[in-house]
Structure formats: C-alpha cells, structure tokens
Image (cartoon, helix red, strand yellow):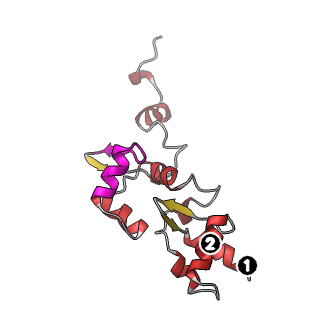
Amino acid sequence: MERTYDTLGESAKLAAVQPCAALDPPWEFEILSRTRVRRRWGHGSDSTLWRLEADGLLVPRRYGGRLGYTWRDLWDYEGGQPPDGMDAAYREDLVGPEAIAALCPLSAAAILARAKRGEIPSRRIGRFVKFVPEEARRWLRQWR
C-alpha cells in the first residue's frame, strides 16, 4: 500500500502540518518588528536596521505577511545564542551599564570596562555594550 497523506494516522498528519512543533520552542517562529528591536536595544533607527540588513549582519524574515527578525537571528547578531535554560531571560529588553551601576558602588564606566574585559557577560550592538538583566543580576550576586 502506498503511503499518502490520506493513509497516515492522525499523529503523522499533525506532524506533517507542524513539522517542528514538538522540537522547537513556541517563540521560535516569532517575528520581531523593527519597533520591538529598537525597544529591546534602547536605541537605533530604521536606517540602522537597514544598514545591518544590507551588510548581511541581520537577516529579515517574512512570516505570515509580517517582515521582521527571529530571536535566533537577533541573538546571533548580538553575540551568540543563550545558554541552556536562559531563553526567557534573553528575550527581555537589554539594559545599559548605567542600570547596573545604579545597583552597585561601581560607576557605569567601571561596569563597561569590566564588560569589555569579559568579566561581566554582555551583548554587543554595534559599538554599544548592553546586558541581559538576569545575567547582570547573577553577576552582581556573585560579585558582592
């Protein structure tokens, strides 16, 4: 008997319709708008994103008629994928060194210098250094 879509069982039909639903997290196919990316970074403009696209540094995707960016593409541009179990934390908006300096006795310049030396986990958006809030909180707890 030839296997066609009509002869497949219900679970196989579901898998055929949603090929990676069981493997990928639900946010995997979320498309982030330019507005959402600018809010995450705390700066930027459409022209910034257009230049990144033209240089091949950030790839726009089209899904369901919407044009935007996936979390994976955004994280690749910022410096890499999140560690295991940190996906939700990495989807939070990034903060600058001033926000971390407000929580400890170090200045924003000292926080930035430590991040550039690799002592504090950070993300790079062009020439700007930003931080994932949860990673910054973890660093502050172990630093004190």
The kind of residue on which mark 2 rests is Ala
The kind of residue on which mark 1 rests is Trp
Q: Which mark is residue 113?
A: 2
Span highlighted in magenta in the image: 47-64
Is residue 68 in view from this perspective?
no
Q: Which of the 4 image quarters holds residue 42?
A: bottom left
Q: Which mark is residue 143?
A: 1
Relative depth, front residue between 74 and 130: 130
Q: Quadrant of the C terminus?
A: bottom right
Query: Could you tell which of marks 1 and 2 lies nearer the N-terminus?
Result: 2
Magenta includes 78? no
Compute the Cα span from label 1 to label 2.
15 Å
How far from the left and from the top, in percent, is residue 21? 48, 43
Crowd tier of the residue under label 2, counting other residues whose Cα lies within 10 Å: few below 14, some 14–19, many 20 or above: some
How far from the left and from the top, in percent, is residue 29? 42, 48
Q: Which of the 4 image quarters holds residue 133?
A: bottom right
